[in-house]
Amino acid sequence: MITTSFFHYITNMCTLEITVYWMDNKFCLQQQLLSFIYLTSSYSRSLLASKVYQALDKYDLKKRLFCITGDNMANSMTIVQHFSNHLAIKDKCIWDPNTN
C-alpha cells in the first residue's frame, strides 16, 4: 500500500510525498518514505500520476501495489485513474482504481 500527500505552500512551491507500507515476515507493519518530490506551481494530474508511477518503477513495486490512499486532495481519484492508465499502457497491467 502507498499513501500520497500533496502540499501547496504559500511560496507557490508544491511537494508530493509517497510513502510505502508493507507487512514484514513477522507481520509487523513497516513504512518507508519512497519519494519526496518538489514541484512548481504548474502541475497536472497526469504529471502527479507520472511521478507516482516513476517512484514505484524505480523500486520495482508497480506490480506489488495493493492500494493507494491519499490526503484530502480534491483530485485524488483522478490522479489514481491516471496512474492506472500509466500501468495499462506502459506495463500491460490491469489495476482497477475503483477496487484498489
Image (cartoon, rainbow, N blue to C red):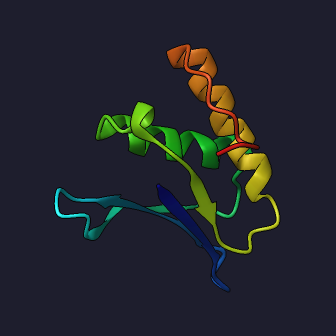
Q: Is residue 77 left or right of residue 57?
A: right
The answer to whether residue 90 is seen in the rendering is: yes
Q: Nearer the viewer, residue 11 or 30?
A: 30
Q: Is residue 78 left or right of residue 3?
A: right
Write the residue at 48% across / 57% down.
Answer: 2
Placement of 81 over or under 75, stated as above or below: above
x, y (%) of residue 57?
38, 34
Placement of 19 over or under 49, stated as above or below: below
x, y (%) of residue 10?
67, 86
Write the residue at 57% across / 26% down.
Answer: 87
The answer to whether residue 35 is seen in the rendering is: no
Residue at the extreme left: 25
Write the residue at 59% across / 72% down.
Answer: 13
x, y (%) of residue 97?
70, 41
Write the residue at 68% across / 64% down.
Answer: 41
**Quarter holding residue 30:** bottom left
Q: Is residue 86 left or right of residue 59?
A: right
Q: How many marks?
A: 0
